Amino acid sequence: MAFNWKTFWTRAFTALIFVAVMMAGLLYNEWSFLILISLIHFGCWWEYLQLIEKIFGVSFHPYMKLGFCLTGYHLLLLCCGSLQLSGYTLDASFSLPFLLAGLVLLVVGMFRQRIHVKALCAAALGFIYISLSWALLLSLRYTTEINIMKDALPSGLSGFLIPILLIVAIWINDTCAYLVGSMIGKTPFSVISPKKTMEGTIGGMLLCVAAITLILQYWFQWPVLLGISLIAAIAGTAGDLLESKLKRMAGVKDSGHIMPGHGGFMDRFDSLLVAIPFVWLFLLFFR
C-alpha cells in the first residue's frame, strides 16, 4: 500500500493543534484548565448521545441533548474549589442555575417526543461516565490537601501536577502498547478491539509503570507514581475497550470528526474517562 502523504500531513497538523491546545489549557492557569475541561466535557456528551442514538435507533430532541450537557456540567462547577467570578464562587453561585436549566430542558424535550426508556437510561449513564469523571479531575486539579511530591512544596502544586502526570502515564501506556504490539504482537487481546494484542497490552502496561516510577521517583513519592501508572495502564485500557464496544454497537469507526485523522473527543479521552475516578479514589485514601 502506497504511503498517503495527504493523510499523514492531515494527522500531523491536527496532532500539533491538539497538543498546543492541551498544553495551553493544562499549564496556563486555573481558568484555562476549567475552560479546556468544559469544552471536552460538552464534546464528549454530544458524541456520547450520538452513539446512544445510533445504538437504539432513536433521535433525542435538541432540548434533551442540551439538558443532559448542562445538568452534567453542574457537577463540574461543584468541584471548582475556590474559583470565583466577579466575587461569586462557581460552586455556590453557578452550579444550581446550570442544574435547574438542564432539568427544565430535559423535561421540555421529553414532552416534545416519544420517550424510549432504554435509550434515556443509557444516556443518563453519561452523568457517571462523562460528567462525574471530569468533575473529579477538576477536584484533583484544585485540591490543596494532597501532596504527591517528595518534599514539602507550595500548596496547590500537587493539584497542578496530578492531571499532567495521569495524562502522560496514559499516553506512555498507549504509545508503548502500540509499539510493542506492532513489533511482537500475535495474540488477540479482545474481540472488541481486534487490533489490540496481548503482547502489546502487557508490554505497554509494564513499560508505563517502569517509565513513570523509575524516571520520576526523584521528585514524586514512589507509591503515588506506582499507583497512578498502574491505574493509567489498567483502567485506561478498560476505557479504550469500553468506547470501542460502544462504537461497535453503534456501527461507527470514530465517535466524531472534530479532529481530522484522529476521530472525536471520546476517541481521544476514552482511557482518561475511566481512569480518573480510580485515581481520585486512590489519592483520596493515600492522603
Image (cartoon, helix red, strand yellow):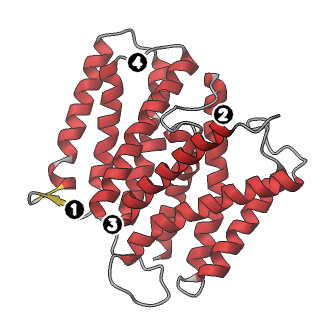
Q: State how far apart marks 4 and 1 are (Cα).
A: 34 Å
Q: Secondary structure at mark 3?
A: loop
> Residue 89: x percent and y percent?
16, 58
Task: Kindly check if marks 1 and 2 are in contact, taking CB atoms under 8 A apart as contact.
Answer: no
Q: Secondary structure at mark 4?
A: loop
Task: Kindly check if marks 2 and 4 are in contact, taking CB atoms under 8 A apart as contact.
Answer: no
Residue where numbered disc 3 is placed: 142
Is there any visible trace of residue 121 in the rendered image?
yes
Residue at horizontal 32%, vertical 55%? Answer: 34
> 100 left or right of 145?
left
Type of residue at label 4?
Answer: Phe
Q: State how far apart marks 1 and 2 are (Cα).
A: 37 Å
Please tell me which of labels 2 and 3 falls first in the chain. Answer: 3
Residue where numbered disc 2 is placed: 245
The quadrant where residue 86 appears: bottom left
Task: Kindly check if marks 1 and 3 are in contact, taking CB atoms under 8 A apart as contact.
Answer: yes
Q: Report crowding for label 1: few under 14, some 14 to 19, many 20 or more residues within 10 A (C-alpha).
A: some
Residue 83, label in figure:
1
Please tell me which of labels 2 and 4 falls first in the chain. Answer: 4
Residue at horizontal 29%, vertical 63%? Answer: 30
Q: Find the residue positioned furthest to the left.
A: 87
Residue where numbered disc 4 is placed: 60
Q: State how far apart marks 3 and 4 are (Cα).
A: 34 Å
Residue at horizontal 67%, vertical 55%? Answer: 174
Q: Secondary structure at mark 1?
A: loop
- Which is more toward the observer, 52 or 266? 266
| 47 versus 165 height, above or below | above
